[in-house]
Image (cartoon, rainbow, N blue to C red):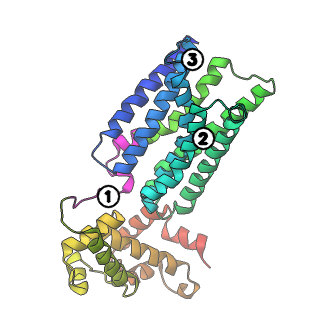
């Protein structure tokens, strides 16, 4: 038991360190840093609570125990918000809708001693956690192909987290029915193991040079209103979607600027702030989506893959092949065989 208690203390200290690190971290995406900071803080409290229980230490008349229990309401929703960040960039409304409702059960548990609630709260909590984890896994899988650079970091973490939760539920149900596969200290510590996939995300992010494939936001000091940015982006997207300017092989920011009559720096700012991309990456997205659509169209069976790529704005076969596999996880030929109509 001594080893298990010390292990929980080490987890608590490490999680607290990471929480502070991500809270004050300036590099990268602010919201992702804040979510990681909260997740690490939550597990720091949970692991420390387990440590004090195993050591028989009572601090603040079970205040830490209550806080630890109710942290669980916010862990899975936070992980879900982290998961959807790349495509949805959740604003305050989405964050509030996913977090604020759980302030109610947490407050009930902290402030009132309702017997019926205390008897059912664990079941409700596990259902809530499993529901959010299911949503996270489904979202990652459905969007993995188009954003695998971001999601290949997250998918293993969410799956491992889900497996650990389900195993934990299994052990609890067995214990309720009189079957004890783990000792009491080991059972208490099992929840602390949920921090493993969070640590994985945290350390990967700390050592990543590209912030999960998300380009850092620039133009913090450029005086351009949000209304102007959105107006510029609407004009930019119209030129891409309706006029399909991305099909021009030698399309540069300057040429594009001249076509839509917006200064290059404002084009870059609008794309970066609204999409989190540089101009070249933005154009590349349209080209890749066009290629994918053309590859699976039966009308193009007579065309070579590179012929299709050239029609979609690519002028180098090797670069096209590299970028296509990087963004889809498949070669163009594999993609065509898998999704052809």
Which residue is disc 1 drawn over?
215
State how far apart marks 3 and 1 are (Cα): 44 Å
Give 329 or 18, whichever is nearer the viewer: 18
Q: Is residue 251 visible?
A: yes
Give 284 or 333, whichever is nearer the viewer: 284
As drawn, the residue found furthest toward the right would be: 177
Q: Residues within 10 Å of mark 2 (few under 14, many from 20)?
A: some
State how far apart marks 1 and 2 are (Cα): 38 Å
Residue 240 picture location, percent across and down? 36, 81
Residue 173 picture location, percent across and down? 75, 32
State how far apart marks 3 and 2 are (Cα): 24 Å
Q: Where 281 sits versus 175, above or below?
A: below
Q: Are marks 1 and 2 in contact (CB under 8 Å)?
A: no
Measuring 18% from the left and 59% from the top, which residue is drawn there?
Answer: 221
SS of the residue at dot 1? loop
Which residue is disc 2 drawn over?
105
SS of the residue at dot 3? helix
Instruction: Answer with left or right where residue 303 lies relative to residue 208.
Output: right
* Picture quarter with the C terminus: bottom right
Give 26 or 300, whichever is nearer the viewer: 26
Q: Is residue 149 visible?
A: no
What is the number of the mark on residue 149? none
Measuring 36% from the left and 57% from the top, which residue is drawn there?
Answer: 214
Which residue is disc 3 drawn over?
53
Query: Does the magenta segment cover residue 75?
Result: no
């Amino acid at each position: 038991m001594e080893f298990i208690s010390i292990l929980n203390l080490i987890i608590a200290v490490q999680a607290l360190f990471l929480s502070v690190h991500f809270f004050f971290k300036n590099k990268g995406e602010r919201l992702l840093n804040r979510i990681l900071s909260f997740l690490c803080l939550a597990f720091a409290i949970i692991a420390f609570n387990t440590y004090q229980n195993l050591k028989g230490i009572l601090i603040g008349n079970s205040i830490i125990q209550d806080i630890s229990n109710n942290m669980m309401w916010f862990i899975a929703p936070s992980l879900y918000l982290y998961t959807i960040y790349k495509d949805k960039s959740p604003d305050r409304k989405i964050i509030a809708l996913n977090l604020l409702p759980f302030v109610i059960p947490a407050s009930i548990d902290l402030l009132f001693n309702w017997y019926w609630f205390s008897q059912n709260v664990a079941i409700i909590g596990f259902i809530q956690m499993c529901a959010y984890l299911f949503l996270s896994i489904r979202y990652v899988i459905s969007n993995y192909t188009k954003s695998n650079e971001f999601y290949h970091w997250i998918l293993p973490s969410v799956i491992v987290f889900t497996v650990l939760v389900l195993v934990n539920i299994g052990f609890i149900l067995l214990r309720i029915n009189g079957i004890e596969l783990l000792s009491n200290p080991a059972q208490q510590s099992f929840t602390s193991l949920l921090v493993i996939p969070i640590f994985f995300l945290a350390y990967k992010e700390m050592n990543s040079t590209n912030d999960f494939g998300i380009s850092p936001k620039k133009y913090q000091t450029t005086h351009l209103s949000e209304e102007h940015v959105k107006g510029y982006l609407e004009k930019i997207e119209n030129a891409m979607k309706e006029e399909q300017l991305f099909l021009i092989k030698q399309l540069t920011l300057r040429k594009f600027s001249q076509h839509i009559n917006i200064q290059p720096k404002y084009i870059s700012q609008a794309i970066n702030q609204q999409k989190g991309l540089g101009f070249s990456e933005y154009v590349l997205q349209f080209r890749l989506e066009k290629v994918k659509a053309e590859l699976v169209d039966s009308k193009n069976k007579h065309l070579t893959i590179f012929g299709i790529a050239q029609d979609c704005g690519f002028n180098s076969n090797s670069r096209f092949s590299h970028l296509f596999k990087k963004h889809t996880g498949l070669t163009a030929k594999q993609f065509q065989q898998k999704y052809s109509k």
